[in-house]
Image: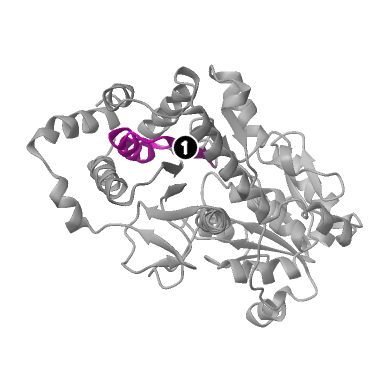
Amino acid sequence: MKVLIVSGCVYAENCGRKSFSGLDYVVSEIAQKVGTEIDVNVYTITPYPKNCFINKIPIRSYTYRSLLKYLSVRDIAIFCRLIKKSQTSLKRAVKYIRSYLISKDVANLCKKEKFDLIHINGADLSCLMISLAASESNIPVLFSLHGLISYGTPNMPKADKEAEKTILRLSGNYDFLMTCVSTGIKSSVMADMNISNQNIMVINNAVHFEEETNADYWYRKYPKIKGKNVVVCVGTIGKNKNQEQILRAFKMLPNDIKSTTMILLAGHDTTNGEIDKIIEENNLNNYVIKCGFLSKKEVSGLFKIASANVLLSYSEGFGLSFIEAAYFGVPSLTFEDLDAAKDIYTKESMILLPDREDRTVANGLIEILKRQWDKSTIKRSANRFTNDIYLGYCEAYNRINSNNSNKIMLSQLKREIGI
């Protein structure tokens, strides 16, 4: 079997990118593990340079110039419908048009390389547009949900939320198999959509560190954290990850805890200065450090010095930082209503908060910092999340192949998309 794995970006050396998301690392690891069993190529929605590889797995991509050959006068009507449908900025509408052209590039690649299946990681409108390539090539498509964007994630475009709902309808109406990264996601969509249990396969993410940073790196970089309780918040700084709330909760802590605690925000800041303003206005400069984007190797060293990992997201598909923290024996604090918590929680490694009030978060911080945790027990809780988990995708491919499922006629798919 030969599979094309599609994702926005992936982690790869010498690809020219300076920062990567957790999903970028995950998809790279999926490709590497699946690639031990079958023939795999990767296609990135973001342009990557030629001769780029994940180990020996080739990364296929495009240039904007290369997409021009797919422009056709006949597509103008489709572009107009896309712009009208998206009801968004011209910049984002152009992104969706680009995705339509990428679908033609992917279809052309499938024709040349004879792929048996396209595996798309994501469920926004760009991903849905690119699935046109599978219909045009008459091969199956597998969608993998690494989170939900139409169930409470803030600041998501309406067109992307509607696209996710369309993909979920495909599963219900056309007997499509899809995968998701947690039972929490599966429960949410099954309760809301007409999808049978057998059509959603849960494949958790894995924890894997090839290289680790020495803990002293962080003590040298930020000397004032030495001897303190270090609370780590990993992830892009923004509305969904909700780092503002830990700052509000921190202000409520007793002085004896506050004076011995440092908060490290590890992630690219997308708040346009808002988080800096909150830190400044609340006199938290001596307690909060913004680390910026960190590589996976740097994150490893951060967890080595951490006392606690805190994730207060509004929406989280899996919560990779939970198992990364557990890998190093660090306990985690989060909300019990988070989809990500259901597969990962053990009472020996996590505290789940019953509501989202600031006072509840503050009390959780006090508890996680005062409790005596058994690091070896926490580490054992992460043992089940090895890279062998990703072989579940091979099982999904084989099920689709055996059942001859996950195919839809091009005309039908265009109707579903509304173009």
Q: Percent x, y for residue 207?
A: 67, 57
Q: Is residue 271 visible?
A: no
Q: Residue at x 55, y 60 (%)?
A: 267
Q: Nearer the viewer, residue 414 or 109?
A: 109
**Membership of 136 in magenta stretch:** yes
Q: Which residue does the numbered mark 1 point to in the structure image?
A: 142
Mark 1: secondary structure: strand
Magenta range: 123-145
Total marks placed: 1
What amino acid is labelled 1 in the image?
Answer: Leu
Q: Which of 68 and 308 is in front in this view?
A: 68
Q: Residue at x 78, y 55 (%)?
A: 383
In this rendering, the answer to whether 167 lies above or below 73 is above
Q: Residue at x 69, y 33 (%)?
A: 337
Q: Percent x, y for residue 298?
A: 61, 71
Q: Percent x, y for residue 350?
A: 80, 48
Q: Quadrant of the C terminus?
A: top left
Place residue 203 in its image quadrant.
top right
Q: Nearer the viewer, residue 207 or 84?
A: 207
